[in-house]
Image (cartoon, rainbow, N blue to C red):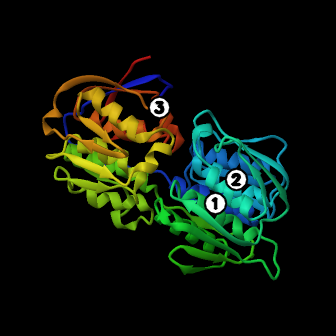
Amino acid sequence: MTRTAKLTIIPPGKPLSGRAMPPGSKSITNRALLLAGLAKGTSRLTGALKSDDTRYMADALRAMGVAIDEPDDTTFVVTGSGRLQPPKAPLFLGNAGTATRFLTAAVASVDGTVVVDGDEHMRKRPIGPLIDALKSLGLDAEAPTGCPPVTVRGNGHFASGRVEIDAGLSSQYVSALLMAAPLAQPGANAPVTIALAGTDIGARGYVDLTLAAMEAFGAKMEQLDAATWRVAATGYTAADFVIEPDASAATYLWAAEVLSGGEIDLGVPNDAFTQPDAKAYETIAKFPHLPAEIDGSQMQDAVPTIAVLAAFNETPVRFVGIANLRVKECDRIRALSTGLNNIREGLAVEEGDDLIVQSDPALAGQTLPAEIDTFADHRIAMSFALAGLKIDGITILDPDCVGKTYPAYWRTLAALGVTYRDND
């Protein structure tokens, strides 16, 4: 599709059926890219996602001396020396939160100064807890606003010792420290111990993804208790690594299937995903009888999908445990309530950090012209497209923002039978 500023979904009026394979996992791709870039030797990453977020990571690694070839649409061949080199310019990472947080810790192993920066949206996303953790290890890192840009002055290796991290805002802080820890200088004090400040952690399942990827690239770590890990200074070794499809992307297809009464083959069993958002499948499958209360804390990126689906549920749904959604690519709680209320006033209510969707099955089949401000957030765009499957007049602003994680999204829906009106 050509680039467009607006896209209106035309309700298909029939079940959506066919084959629609989700792209590779963004979360796993960016972890694997970083670890392959830190490893000595050549790694082959297959099933990878090629999107804005992963390109920012790949380009940042290239800027630090890592060779990355792309022989096809789902493969990265990464060759590293085991050390990152100082880049000649600041690393620009757009609004890629994973890349920004992961690299902020990893570049502490560089012998030199590295500036990690992003776009206007990334410059509003908090990184202070990670900076505080790096400083507590004696590393030279600063982010004067508490958000990017970040300046890190490294001395050639990560620091050893014990560090506590407040992971209440994001599990990415924990993952960033874990992945950087094997880069400590070998020696008597080499192990890095990473402990949560309290037991609160956003989407703990993503830490499990991190640990699994680290192990695949030769890292050795021990979980001392539910909130503490000890990581050896092993560095990383090259490996061939297969990346599974993206569970967050799959949620849109699962929702489109139940909303339209269709049958969509994702090419992978629903229980084959290891990512946290795969938990959403069991919830989505209950539509139109979703639970009265849904805890989104461990499937955060699936919440926009389920919230839009909830608009057509038989009974109202309250979403709890979603405070972290306020510091994602945008304030997703506000974006969801705004979009839903643009469709029909009173459809959504914010109570503190909870979101209540006042479900109404009678919305289906109506014409309710509504422009959905995506706030440049891919998940808001993809989620509200689901409303357009049942309501005529849903127009998505800035539809191309889906390129952040799912560049083929609109083509995928079209292949299933969805049509559009471009509104340039």
Q: Amino acid at mark 3?
A: Phe
Front-most of residues 230 and 33? 230
How far apart are the two marked residues, 2 and 3, measured between alpha carbons? 25 Å
Q: Callout 1: 10 Å neighbours few (<14), some, many (20+)?
A: many
Residue under circle 3? 375
- Residue at image position (51%, 25%) is 3
**Location of residue 191 (image quadrant):** bottom right
Residue under circle 1? 176
How far apart are the two marked residues, 1 and 3, measured between alpha carbons? 26 Å
| Vertical comparison of 118 with 258: above or below | above
- Visible residue check, residue 17: no
Residue under circle 2? 104
Q: Amino acid at mark 2?
A: Thr
Which numbered disc flags the more N-terminal residue, 2 or 3?
Answer: 2
Front-most of residues 220 and 69? 220
Q: Secondary structure at mark 2?
A: helix
Q: Callout 2: 10 Å neighbours few (<14), some, many (20+)?
A: many
How far apart are the two marked residues, 2 and 1, measured between alpha carbons? 8 Å
Numbered disc total: 3
* Image location (x, y in percent) of residue 296: 36, 55
- Residue at image position (70%, 58%) is 105
Front-most of residues 50 and 338? 338
Tag 2 and tag 3, C-beta contact below 8 Å: no
Which numbered disc flags the more N-terminal residue, 2 or 1?
Answer: 2
Which numbered disc flags the more N-terminal residue, 1 or 3?
Answer: 1
Q: Secondary structure at mark 3?
A: loop
Front-most of residues 185 and 58? 185
Quarter of the rendering occupied by the C terminus? top left
Q: Which mark is residue 360?
A: none
**Location of residue 338 (image quadrant):** top left
| Vertical comparison of 313 with 240: above or below | above
Tag 2 and tag 1, C-beta contact below 8 Å: yes
